Amino acid sequence: MIVILDLKFTAWAGSQERGWSGPGEFREVVQIGALRVDSAHLLVTGEFNQLVRPRHNPGLSDYFQELTGISQAAVDEHGVPFADALDAFLDFCAGHYVLSYGNDMVILGENLVLQVPEGRTPKRGLPPFVNIRTYFNTVLPATEGLSSGRLAYALGRADRIDREHDALADCYSILEALRHLREQGHPLIAV
């Protein structure tokens, strides 16, 4: 089994270019999306999709809402504290390798500091993690410079880009890229 992870975190116009260095700009997780996948056949055996209420910037920027389609109302109604979402995600992973198309584990680490109350620790340790972006970009040059939500489309595995910047939809796009890798005779992860 492997787990494919994608995170959505607070952002403002220009925050990525500034490296989130503006006043009060923190990369607080707002959505955790993941797929548990049978690595032998690349079939989905489970989905995880959780909204998170940011602690330092509870009001989502208009930029973030337009980019992701995640509304303030949805986060207010369905979001949970990060520590609760992380515990549920770690249970979902059950120690399996986690793959992401970027440094999502770094973002999780930042949020352990930003959003977990003092004295509370996750109920499990973080699972082993692999950032597959560089590997994808090397073996599948068509993926270079693309967001995770555009992978399936760029590789001809989707007729359109579906809900780009939605964490769970982006996980499915990553899965299609993994299937493409396998069909091309490449290993899922460079060793």
Image (tube, grey):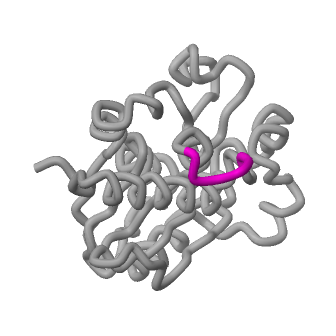
Q: Is residue 9 left or right of residue 100?
A: right
Q: Is residue 91 above or below residue 26?
A: below
Residue shown at 41% from the left, 61% from the top: 179
Q: Is residue 175 or residue 183 the one in the foreground?
A: 183
Of the 4 image quadrants, the one containing the N terminus is bottom left
Is residue 170 visible to us here?
A: yes
Quarter of image, res 33: bottom right
For the point 48% across and 78% down, the residue is 44
At horizontal 29% and vertical 37% (from top left) the residue drawn is 139
In the figure, 142 relative to 99: above or below? Answer: above
Q: Position of residue 83 (x, y in %)?
A: 50, 67
> Residue most toward the right?
73
Judge from the rendering whether residue 124 lies leftward or rightward of residue 30; answer left or right: left
Residue 60 at x, y = what percent? 78, 43
Q: Is residue 12 above or below residue 129?
A: above
Magenta residues, as a range? 156-161
The answer to if 77 sits in the magenta stretch is: no
Q: Identify which residue, 139 or 169, lies in the foreground.
A: 139
**Rendering coords of residue 96 (x, y %):** 27, 74
